[in-house]
Protein backbone atom coordinates (compact mmCIF):
# COMPACT_ATOMS: atom_id res chain seq x y z
CA UNK A 1 0.00 0.00 0.00
CA UNK A 2 1.38 3.43 -0.89
CA UNK A 3 1.35 6.40 1.45
CA UNK A 4 -1.32 8.03 -0.74
CA UNK A 5 -3.52 4.94 -0.45
CA UNK A 6 -3.19 5.04 3.34
CA UNK A 7 -4.80 8.48 3.28
CA UNK A 8 -7.83 7.50 1.24
CA UNK A 9 -10.12 7.55 4.26
CA UNK A 10 -10.06 7.97 8.00
CA UNK A 11 -11.21 4.34 8.31
CA UNK A 12 -8.17 3.14 6.40
CA UNK A 13 -5.87 5.34 8.49
CA UNK A 14 -7.45 3.99 11.64
CA UNK A 15 -6.95 0.38 10.57
CA UNK A 16 -3.29 1.04 9.78
CA UNK A 17 -2.66 2.67 13.15
CA UNK A 18 -4.58 -0.12 14.89
CA UNK A 19 -2.36 -2.69 13.22
CA UNK A 20 0.78 -0.85 14.39
CA UNK A 21 -0.48 -0.58 17.97
CA UNK A 22 -1.37 -4.27 18.13
CA UNK A 23 1.96 -5.16 16.47
CA UNK A 24 4.16 -3.33 18.98
CA UNK A 25 1.78 -3.08 21.96
CA UNK A 26 3.01 0.23 23.40
CA UNK A 27 1.62 1.68 26.63
CA UNK A 28 1.27 5.11 25.02
CA UNK A 29 0.35 6.04 21.45
CA UNK A 30 1.94 8.93 19.57
CA UNK A 31 -0.13 9.59 16.47
CA UNK A 32 1.83 11.12 13.61
CA UNK A 33 0.46 11.67 10.11
CA UNK A 34 3.17 13.54 8.26
CA UNK A 35 5.19 16.70 8.92
CA UNK A 36 3.55 18.30 5.90
CA UNK A 37 -0.16 17.89 6.61
CA UNK A 38 -0.40 21.11 8.60
CA UNK A 39 1.51 22.94 5.87
CA UNK A 40 -0.85 21.43 3.30
CA UNK A 41 -3.79 22.96 5.14
CA UNK A 42 -2.02 26.33 4.78
CA UNK A 43 -1.70 25.95 1.02
CA UNK A 44 1.42 23.89 0.28
CA UNK A 45 0.83 21.64 -2.75
CA UNK A 46 2.01 18.09 -2.14
CA UNK A 47 2.71 15.26 -4.53
CA UNK A 48 1.27 12.23 -2.76
CA UNK A 49 1.60 9.91 -5.76
CA UNK A 50 5.37 9.50 -5.90
CA UNK A 51 5.27 6.15 -4.11
CA UNK A 52 6.68 7.49 -0.86
CA UNK A 53 6.34 10.42 1.48
CA UNK A 54 4.56 13.48 0.09
CA UNK A 55 6.88 15.89 -1.70
CA UNK A 56 6.09 19.62 -1.79
CA UNK A 57 5.74 20.94 -5.31
CA UNK A 58 4.51 24.49 -4.69
CA UNK A 59 4.52 26.89 -1.76
CA UNK A 60 2.08 29.72 -1.07
CA UNK A 61 3.15 33.28 -0.50
CA UNK A 62 2.70 35.01 2.82
CA UNK A 63 0.03 37.20 1.26
CA UNK A 64 -1.90 34.17 -0.04
CA UNK A 65 -1.87 32.47 3.33
CA UNK A 66 -2.74 35.70 5.16
CA UNK A 67 -5.71 36.36 2.93
CA UNK A 68 -7.21 32.88 3.04
CA UNK A 69 -7.64 32.83 6.80
CA UNK A 70 -7.71 29.56 8.70
CA UNK A 71 -8.72 26.97 6.13
CA UNK A 72 -10.11 23.54 6.65
CA UNK A 73 -7.56 21.18 8.10
CA UNK A 74 -8.15 18.47 5.49
CA UNK A 75 -6.14 15.47 6.49
CA UNK A 76 -5.99 16.63 10.08
CA UNK A 77 -9.73 15.97 10.33
CA UNK A 78 -9.12 12.48 8.93
CA UNK A 79 -6.43 11.93 11.52
CA UNK A 80 -8.77 13.10 14.28
CA UNK A 81 -11.41 10.63 13.15
CA UNK A 82 -8.82 7.84 13.12
CA UNK A 83 -7.72 8.87 16.60
CA UNK A 84 -11.28 8.71 17.95
CA UNK A 85 -11.54 5.15 16.65
CA UNK A 86 -8.22 4.21 18.26
CA UNK A 87 -9.36 5.75 21.53
CA UNK A 88 -12.42 3.50 21.52
CA UNK A 89 -10.38 0.36 20.84
CA UNK A 90 -7.52 1.17 23.23
CA UNK A 91 -9.16 3.20 26.01
CA UNK A 92 -6.34 2.55 28.49
CA UNK A 93 -3.58 3.87 26.22
CA UNK A 94 -3.03 7.66 26.34
CA UNK A 95 -3.00 9.10 22.83
CA UNK A 96 -0.77 12.04 21.85
CA UNK A 97 -1.23 13.99 18.62
CA UNK A 98 1.95 15.41 17.10
CA UNK A 99 1.96 19.13 16.31
CA UNK A 100 4.63 21.22 14.59
CA UNK A 101 5.77 24.33 16.45
CA UNK A 102 5.09 27.64 14.62
CA UNK A 103 8.74 28.01 13.55
CA UNK A 104 8.90 24.63 11.85
CA UNK A 105 5.45 25.02 10.33
CA UNK A 106 6.54 28.34 8.84
CA UNK A 107 9.62 26.61 7.37
CA UNK A 108 7.49 23.82 5.89
CA UNK A 109 4.99 26.27 4.42
CA UNK A 110 7.49 28.74 2.99
CA UNK A 111 9.98 26.12 1.78
CA UNK A 112 12.79 25.10 4.08
CA UNK A 113 15.82 26.44 2.24
CA UNK A 114 14.09 29.72 1.43
CA UNK A 115 12.97 30.06 5.05
CA UNK A 116 16.41 29.39 6.50
CA UNK A 117 17.99 31.84 4.04
CA UNK A 118 15.45 34.50 5.01
CA UNK A 119 16.34 33.93 8.65
CA UNK A 120 19.44 35.95 7.80
CA UNK A 121 18.34 38.06 4.84
CA UNK A 122 14.82 39.08 5.84
CA UNK A 123 14.09 38.51 9.50
CA UNK A 124 10.89 40.52 9.40
CA UNK A 125 9.36 38.21 6.82
CA UNK A 126 10.28 35.23 8.97
CA UNK A 127 8.62 36.89 11.97
CA UNK A 128 5.51 37.57 9.90
CA UNK A 129 5.33 33.92 8.81
CA UNK A 130 5.75 32.67 12.37
CA UNK A 131 2.99 35.01 13.57
CA UNK A 132 0.69 33.51 10.98
CA UNK A 133 1.56 29.88 11.68
CA UNK A 134 1.23 30.47 15.41
CA UNK A 135 -2.37 31.57 14.92
CA UNK A 136 -2.98 28.39 12.92
CA UNK A 137 -1.45 26.17 15.59
CA UNK A 138 -3.29 27.89 18.43
CA UNK A 139 -6.52 27.07 16.61
CA UNK A 140 -5.40 23.48 16.12
CA UNK A 141 -4.53 23.08 19.80
CA UNK A 142 -8.07 24.07 20.73
CA UNK A 143 -9.53 21.67 18.18
CA UNK A 144 -7.44 18.69 19.30
CA UNK A 145 -7.93 19.39 23.01
CA UNK A 146 -11.68 19.69 22.43
CA UNK A 147 -11.55 16.06 21.25
CA UNK A 148 -9.76 15.26 24.53
CA UNK A 149 -6.49 14.16 22.97
CA UNK A 150 -3.08 15.11 24.31
CA UNK A 151 -0.54 16.89 22.16
CA UNK A 152 3.19 16.49 21.73
CA UNK A 153 4.82 19.47 20.06
CA UNK A 154 7.83 18.92 17.84
CA UNK A 155 10.24 21.43 16.38
CA UNK A 156 12.00 19.49 13.64
CA UNK A 157 13.74 22.49 12.10
CA UNK A 158 14.97 23.96 15.34
CA UNK A 159 16.65 20.65 16.18
CA UNK A 160 19.72 18.81 14.96
CA UNK A 161 21.94 21.88 15.09
CA UNK A 162 20.19 23.52 12.14
CA UNK A 163 20.04 26.98 13.77
CA UNK A 164 22.07 28.78 16.41
CA UNK A 165 21.05 29.72 19.90
CA UNK A 166 20.23 33.35 19.09
CA UNK A 167 17.95 32.24 16.27
CA UNK A 168 16.31 29.70 18.59
CA UNK A 169 15.79 32.33 21.27
CA UNK A 170 14.35 34.91 18.92
CA UNK A 171 12.36 32.84 16.44
CA UNK A 172 11.50 29.52 18.09
CA UNK A 173 11.21 29.89 21.84
CA UNK A 174 8.54 32.64 22.21
CA UNK A 175 5.90 31.04 20.00
CA UNK A 176 6.74 27.54 21.21
CA UNK A 177 6.17 28.62 24.80
CA UNK A 178 2.88 30.28 23.90
CA UNK A 179 1.68 27.10 22.19
CA UNK A 180 2.57 25.04 25.26
CA UNK A 181 0.85 27.64 27.46
CA UNK A 182 -2.27 27.24 25.31
CA UNK A 183 -2.12 23.47 25.67
CA UNK A 184 -1.93 23.64 29.44
CA UNK A 185 -4.62 26.36 29.57
CA UNK A 186 -6.86 23.85 27.80
CA UNK A 187 -6.04 21.18 30.36
CA UNK A 188 -3.37 19.27 28.43
CA UNK A 189 0.15 18.06 29.12
CA UNK A 190 3.04 20.27 28.14
CA UNK A 191 4.80 17.64 26.02
CA UNK A 192 7.66 18.37 23.64
CA UNK A 193 9.85 16.28 21.35
CA UNK A 194 13.45 17.18 20.51
CA UNK A 195 15.32 15.43 17.69
CA UNK A 196 19.06 14.89 17.86
CA UNK A 197 21.49 16.48 20.26
CA UNK A 198 20.81 19.54 22.38
CA UNK A 199 23.58 22.11 22.47
CA UNK A 200 23.50 25.46 24.19
CA UNK A 201 19.73 25.69 24.07
CA UNK A 202 19.29 23.61 27.19
CA UNK A 203 19.46 26.65 29.44
CA UNK A 204 16.12 27.68 27.95
CA UNK A 205 14.29 24.37 28.31
CA UNK A 206 13.41 24.72 32.03
CA UNK A 207 11.43 27.85 31.10
CA UNK A 208 9.13 25.71 28.96
CA UNK A 209 7.92 24.01 32.18
CA UNK A 210 7.51 20.72 30.41
CA UNK A 211 5.53 17.84 31.84
CA UNK A 212 7.12 15.48 29.33
CA UNK A 213 10.24 15.75 27.17
CA UNK A 214 10.75 13.20 24.41
CA UNK A 215 14.32 13.09 23.24
CA UNK A 216 16.95 11.29 21.19
CA UNK A 217 20.26 12.42 22.65
CA UNK A 218 20.42 14.87 25.52
CA UNK A 219 23.10 15.68 28.05
CA UNK A 220 22.38 13.96 31.37
CA UNK A 221 22.74 17.22 33.29
CA UNK A 222 19.61 18.66 31.73
CA UNK A 223 17.31 16.55 33.90
CA UNK A 224 18.56 18.12 37.10
CA UNK A 225 17.41 21.47 35.68
CA UNK A 226 13.91 20.08 35.08
CA UNK A 227 13.01 17.95 38.10
CA UNK A 228 9.28 17.95 37.28
CA UNK A 229 9.72 16.79 33.68
CA UNK A 230 9.14 13.16 32.70
CA UNK A 231 11.78 11.93 30.20
CA UNK A 232 10.67 9.83 27.27
CA UNK A 233 13.28 8.14 25.11
CA UNK A 234 16.36 5.97 25.54
CA UNK A 235 16.32 3.81 22.41
CA UNK A 236 18.60 5.32 19.81
CA UNK A 237 18.08 5.17 16.07
CA UNK A 238 21.42 3.51 15.49
CA UNK A 239 20.67 1.03 18.26
CA UNK A 240 17.48 -0.01 16.49
CA UNK A 241 19.25 -0.20 13.17
CA UNK A 242 21.88 -2.59 14.50
CA UNK A 243 21.22 -6.26 13.87
CA UNK A 244 23.31 -7.28 16.88
CA UNK A 245 21.08 -7.54 19.98
CA UNK A 246 24.09 -7.04 22.24
CA UNK A 247 24.92 -3.74 20.53
CA UNK A 248 21.35 -2.60 20.91
CA UNK A 249 21.19 -3.66 24.54
CA UNK A 250 24.47 -1.92 25.34
CA UNK A 251 23.28 1.30 23.68
CA UNK A 252 20.04 1.14 25.61
CA UNK A 253 21.63 0.59 29.01
CA UNK A 254 24.15 3.37 28.42
CA UNK A 255 21.46 5.78 27.30
CA UNK A 256 19.20 5.12 30.28
CA UNK A 257 21.78 4.63 33.03
CA UNK A 258 21.60 8.19 34.27
CA UNK A 259 18.02 9.04 33.37
CA UNK A 260 15.95 10.09 36.37
CA UNK A 261 13.28 7.64 37.40
CA UNK A 262 10.52 7.26 36.42
CA UNK A 263 10.95 7.64 32.65
CA UNK A 264 9.08 6.38 29.61
CA UNK A 265 11.14 4.06 27.44
CA UNK A 266 10.60 4.83 23.76
CA UNK A 267 12.36 4.70 20.40
CA UNK A 268 12.21 8.53 20.45
CA UNK A 269 12.17 8.79 16.68
CA UNK A 270 10.70 6.93 13.72
CA UNK A 271 10.95 3.16 13.88
CA UNK A 272 11.99 1.36 10.67
CA UNK A 273 8.87 -0.07 9.06
CA UNK A 274 10.25 -3.59 8.94
CA UNK A 275 11.41 -3.62 12.56
CA UNK A 276 10.39 -6.86 14.20
CA UNK A 277 8.42 -6.48 17.47
CA UNK A 278 10.74 -8.84 19.33
CA UNK A 279 13.60 -6.33 18.88
CA UNK A 280 11.65 -3.84 20.98
CA UNK A 281 10.30 -6.52 23.29
CA UNK A 282 13.85 -7.65 24.08
CA UNK A 283 14.75 -4.06 24.94
CA UNK A 284 11.69 -3.60 27.13
CA UNK A 285 12.49 -6.89 28.89
CA UNK A 286 15.80 -5.38 30.08
CA UNK A 287 13.71 -3.24 32.42
CA UNK A 288 11.46 -5.99 33.75
CA UNK A 289 13.50 -6.27 36.92
CA UNK A 290 13.91 -2.55 37.33
CA UNK A 291 12.30 -1.11 40.40
CA UNK B 1 47.30 43.42 -5.14
CA UNK B 2 46.32 40.00 -6.47
CA UNK B 3 46.66 38.30 -3.12
CA UNK B 4 44.83 41.15 -1.50
CA UNK B 5 41.80 40.83 -3.75
CA UNK B 6 41.72 37.07 -3.20
CA UNK B 7 41.71 37.68 0.56
CA UNK B 8 38.98 40.25 0.15
CA UNK B 9 36.89 37.79 -1.84
CA UNK B 10 37.21 35.06 0.74
CA UNK B 11 36.48 37.51 3.55
CA UNK B 12 33.35 38.73 1.74
CA UNK B 13 32.11 35.16 1.36
CA UNK B 14 32.62 34.50 5.07
CA UNK B 15 30.93 37.81 5.89
CA UNK B 16 27.94 36.71 3.75
CA UNK B 17 28.31 39.95 1.82
CA UNK B 18 26.88 39.28 -1.64
CA UNK B 19 27.23 42.85 -2.88
CA UNK B 20 30.91 42.88 -2.03
CA UNK B 21 31.55 39.49 -3.66
CA UNK B 22 29.87 40.70 -6.83
CA UNK B 23 31.84 43.95 -6.79
CA UNK B 24 35.15 42.15 -6.33
CA UNK B 25 34.36 39.50 -8.95
CA UNK B 26 33.54 42.21 -11.48
CA UNK B 27 36.80 43.97 -10.62
CA UNK B 28 38.70 40.73 -11.30
CA UNK B 29 36.99 40.31 -14.66
CA UNK B 30 37.93 43.86 -15.67
CA UNK B 31 41.55 43.31 -14.65
CA UNK B 32 44.39 41.01 -15.75
CA UNK B 33 43.83 38.70 -12.80
CA UNK B 34 43.14 35.05 -13.65
CA UNK B 35 39.43 34.49 -12.82
CA UNK B 36 40.05 30.79 -12.21
CA UNK B 37 42.61 31.72 -9.56
CA UNK B 38 40.12 34.15 -8.05
CA UNK B 39 37.66 31.27 -7.67
CA UNK B 40 40.28 28.92 -6.29
CA UNK B 41 42.12 31.29 -3.95
CA UNK B 42 39.26 33.65 -3.14
CA UNK B 43 35.85 32.02 -3.19
CA UNK B 44 36.89 28.43 -2.51
CA UNK B 45 39.09 29.57 0.39
CA UNK B 46 36.12 31.51 1.72
CA UNK B 47 33.87 28.47 1.51
CA UNK B 48 36.55 26.35 3.19
CA UNK B 49 36.40 28.77 6.11
CA UNK B 50 32.60 28.61 6.04
CA UNK B 51 32.83 24.83 6.19
CA UNK B 52 35.29 24.99 9.06
CA UNK B 53 33.02 27.32 11.02
CA UNK B 54 30.07 25.02 10.29
CA UNK B 55 32.00 22.05 11.64
CA UNK B 56 32.89 24.04 14.76
CA UNK B 57 29.28 25.14 15.31
CA UNK B 58 30.07 28.79 14.74
CA UNK B 59 28.05 28.82 11.57
CA UNK B 60 24.80 26.96 11.18
CA UNK B 61 22.66 25.94 8.23
CA UNK B 62 21.21 29.41 7.50
CA UNK B 63 24.71 30.90 7.33
CA UNK B 64 25.95 28.11 5.08
CA UNK B 65 22.97 28.52 2.74
CA UNK B 66 23.55 32.26 2.45
CA UNK B 67 27.31 31.76 2.02
CA UNK B 68 26.61 29.28 -0.78
CA UNK B 69 24.35 31.77 -2.49
CA UNK B 70 26.96 34.52 -2.07
CA UNK B 71 29.74 32.28 -3.38
CA UNK B 72 27.68 31.23 -6.39
CA UNK B 73 27.01 34.85 -7.30
CA UNK B 74 30.77 35.42 -7.53
CA UNK B 75 31.47 32.14 -9.30
CA UNK B 76 28.93 32.88 -12.03
CA UNK B 77 30.66 36.18 -12.83
CA UNK B 78 34.18 34.75 -12.71
CA UNK B 79 33.36 31.60 -14.69
CA UNK B 80 31.95 33.70 -17.52
CA UNK B 81 35.47 35.09 -17.99
CA UNK B 82 37.25 31.75 -17.94
CA UNK B 83 38.33 30.59 -21.37
CA UNK B 84 39.44 27.08 -20.48
CA UNK B 85 37.51 24.57 -18.41
CA UNK B 86 38.73 24.35 -14.80
CA UNK B 87 40.30 21.12 -13.68
CA UNK B 88 37.97 19.07 -11.54
CA UNK B 89 39.26 16.66 -8.94
CA UNK B 90 36.84 13.90 -9.79
CA UNK B 91 33.16 13.13 -10.24
CA UNK B 92 30.94 12.43 -7.27
CA UNK B 93 27.48 10.93 -7.55
CA UNK B 94 25.32 12.39 -4.81
CA UNK B 95 21.88 11.18 -3.71
CA UNK B 96 19.40 10.94 -0.87
CA UNK B 97 18.35 7.31 -0.53
CA UNK B 98 15.02 5.87 -1.56
CA UNK B 99 12.21 6.69 0.85
CA UNK B 100 13.70 9.95 2.12
CA UNK B 101 12.74 13.35 0.75
CA UNK B 102 14.93 15.49 3.01
CA UNK B 103 17.63 17.09 0.90
CA UNK B 104 18.79 20.14 2.82
CA UNK B 105 21.98 18.51 4.06
CA UNK B 106 22.66 16.95 0.69
CA UNK B 107 22.27 20.33 -1.03
CA UNK B 108 24.79 21.91 1.31
CA UNK B 109 27.21 19.05 0.70
CA UNK B 110 26.80 19.53 -3.05
CA UNK B 111 27.72 23.20 -2.86
CA UNK B 112 30.72 22.47 -0.63
CA UNK B 113 31.97 19.71 -2.94
CA UNK B 114 31.53 21.84 -6.06
CA UNK B 115 33.33 24.82 -4.63
CA UNK B 116 36.08 22.46 -3.45
CA UNK B 117 36.64 21.52 -7.09
CA UNK B 118 34.65 18.33 -7.55
CA UNK B 119 32.26 17.63 -10.38
CA UNK B 120 28.98 16.62 -8.72
CA UNK B 121 26.13 14.69 -10.32
CA UNK B 122 23.20 15.29 -7.99
CA UNK B 123 20.45 12.71 -8.39
CA UNK B 124 18.24 14.45 -5.84
CA UNK B 125 16.11 12.77 -3.22
CA UNK B 126 14.21 9.51 -2.88
CA UNK B 127 16.67 7.78 -5.22
CA UNK B 128 16.41 4.05 -5.82
CA UNK B 129 19.64 2.10 -5.89
CA UNK B 130 18.83 0.89 -9.40
CA UNK B 131 19.12 4.46 -10.66
CA UNK B 132 22.44 4.86 -8.87
CA UNK B 133 23.73 1.70 -10.57
CA UNK B 134 22.61 2.83 -14.02
CA UNK B 135 24.31 6.22 -13.54
CA UNK B 136 27.54 4.49 -12.54
CA UNK B 137 27.36 2.30 -15.63
CA UNK B 138 26.62 5.26 -17.91
CA UNK B 139 29.14 7.76 -16.61
CA UNK B 140 32.62 7.87 -15.15
CA UNK B 141 31.98 8.13 -11.40
CA UNK B 142 34.81 8.30 -8.89
CA UNK B 143 32.89 8.35 -5.62
CA UNK B 144 29.35 7.74 -4.37
CA UNK B 145 27.93 9.96 -1.61
CA UNK B 146 24.65 8.92 0.02
CA UNK B 147 22.57 10.78 2.56
CA UNK B 148 19.57 10.13 4.75
CA UNK B 149 17.96 12.14 7.53
CA UNK B 150 15.52 9.50 8.74
CA UNK B 151 15.95 6.48 10.95
CA UNK B 152 13.36 4.60 8.90
CA UNK B 153 15.57 4.75 5.80
CA UNK B 154 18.78 3.66 7.49
CA UNK B 155 18.16 0.03 6.42
CA UNK B 156 17.70 1.29 2.86
CA UNK B 157 21.00 3.14 3.16
CA UNK B 158 22.60 -0.17 4.16
CA UNK B 159 21.01 -1.92 1.18
CA UNK B 160 22.18 0.80 -1.20
CA UNK B 161 25.76 0.61 0.01
CA UNK B 162 25.76 -3.19 -0.18
CA UNK B 163 24.31 -3.17 -3.69
CA UNK B 164 26.82 -0.62 -4.96
CA UNK B 165 29.70 -2.54 -3.41
CA UNK B 166 28.47 -5.87 -4.79
CA UNK B 167 28.39 -4.43 -8.30
CA UNK B 168 31.32 -1.99 -8.15
CA UNK B 169 33.58 -3.18 -5.39
CA UNK B 170 36.38 -0.70 -6.03
CA UNK B 171 34.13 2.37 -6.02
CA UNK B 172 34.37 4.23 -2.71
CA UNK B 173 31.15 5.12 -0.93
CA UNK B 174 30.69 7.77 1.71
CA UNK B 175 27.56 8.31 3.78
CA UNK B 176 26.14 11.07 5.92
CA UNK B 177 23.00 12.29 7.66
CA UNK B 178 21.76 13.17 11.11
CA UNK B 179 20.83 9.69 12.43
CA UNK B 180 24.03 8.06 11.19
CA UNK B 181 27.13 7.37 13.22
CA UNK B 182 30.64 6.38 12.31
CA UNK B 183 29.94 2.94 13.79
CA UNK B 184 26.86 2.49 11.66
CA UNK B 185 28.68 3.62 8.53
CA UNK B 186 31.43 1.08 9.11
CA UNK B 187 28.93 -1.66 9.86
CA UNK B 188 27.28 -1.22 6.48
CA UNK B 189 30.55 -1.17 4.56
CA UNK B 190 30.83 2.54 3.80
CA UNK B 191 34.33 3.89 3.28
CA UNK B 192 33.74 7.22 5.01
CA UNK B 193 31.24 8.81 7.35
CA UNK B 194 30.70 12.53 6.92
CA UNK B 195 29.47 14.08 10.15
CA UNK B 196 28.83 17.36 8.33
CA UNK B 197 29.38 19.02 4.97
CA UNK B 198 32.96 19.95 5.78
CA UNK B 199 33.72 16.34 6.69
CA UNK B 200 32.24 15.29 3.35
CA UNK B 201 34.81 17.45 1.53
CA UNK B 202 37.61 16.07 3.71
CA UNK B 203 36.38 12.53 2.99
CA UNK B 204 36.13 13.10 -0.74
CA UNK B 205 39.69 14.41 -0.86
CA UNK B 206 40.97 11.52 1.23
CA UNK B 207 39.12 8.82 -0.74
CA UNK B 208 40.23 10.28 -4.08
CA UNK B 209 43.77 11.08 -2.99
CA UNK B 210 43.43 14.85 -3.46
CA UNK B 211 45.86 16.99 -1.52
CA UNK B 212 45.15 20.59 -0.62
CA UNK B 213 47.79 23.13 -1.56
CA UNK B 214 49.00 25.28 1.29
Image: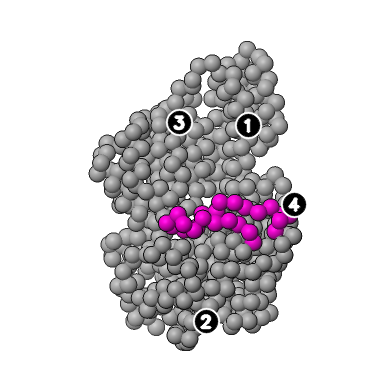
> How is colour applied across the structure in the image?
one colour
Against A9, residue B71 (above or below) is above
Q: Is mark 1 on a helix, strand or loop?
A: helix
Identify the residue under disc 2.
Answer: A84
Chain under disc 3: B
Residue at the image position 62 percent from the left and 25 percent from the top: B77
Q: Do labels 1 and 3 share a chain?
A: yes
Q: Is mark 4 on a helix, strand or loop?
A: helix
Residue at the image position 37 percent from the left and 69 percent from the top: A253
Pinpoint residue A74: horizontal percent, then vertical percent.
59, 68
Identify the residue under disc 3.
Answer: B118
For label 2, count other residues whose C-alpha is less than 10 Å away and answer few (under 14), some (14-19) or many (20+): some
Identify the residue under disc 4.
Answer: A124
Distance (Cα) linking label 4 and label 2: 40 Å
Screen quadrant of the N terminus of chain B: top right
Identify the residue under disc 1.
Answer: B73
Chain under disc 2: A
Q: Is mark 2 on a helix, strand or loop?
A: helix
Q: Give the range drawn in magenta.
A: A42-65
Amino acid sequence: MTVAECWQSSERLASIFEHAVRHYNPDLIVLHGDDYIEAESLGVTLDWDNGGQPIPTAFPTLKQVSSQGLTGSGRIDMLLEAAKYLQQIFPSKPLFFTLRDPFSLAALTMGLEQFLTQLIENRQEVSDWIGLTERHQQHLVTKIRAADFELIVGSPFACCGIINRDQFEQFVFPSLKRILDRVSAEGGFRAFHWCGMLNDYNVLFPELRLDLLSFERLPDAIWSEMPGTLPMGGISASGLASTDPEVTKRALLEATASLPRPFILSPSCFVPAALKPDVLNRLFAEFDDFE
Amino acid sequence: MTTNIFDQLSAAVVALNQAEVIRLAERVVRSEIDPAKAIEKGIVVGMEEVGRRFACHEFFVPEVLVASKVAQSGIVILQSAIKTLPIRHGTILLAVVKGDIHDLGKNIVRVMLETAGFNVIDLGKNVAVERILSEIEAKHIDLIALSTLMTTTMPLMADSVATVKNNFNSLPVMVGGAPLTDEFARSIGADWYGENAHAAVVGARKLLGISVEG
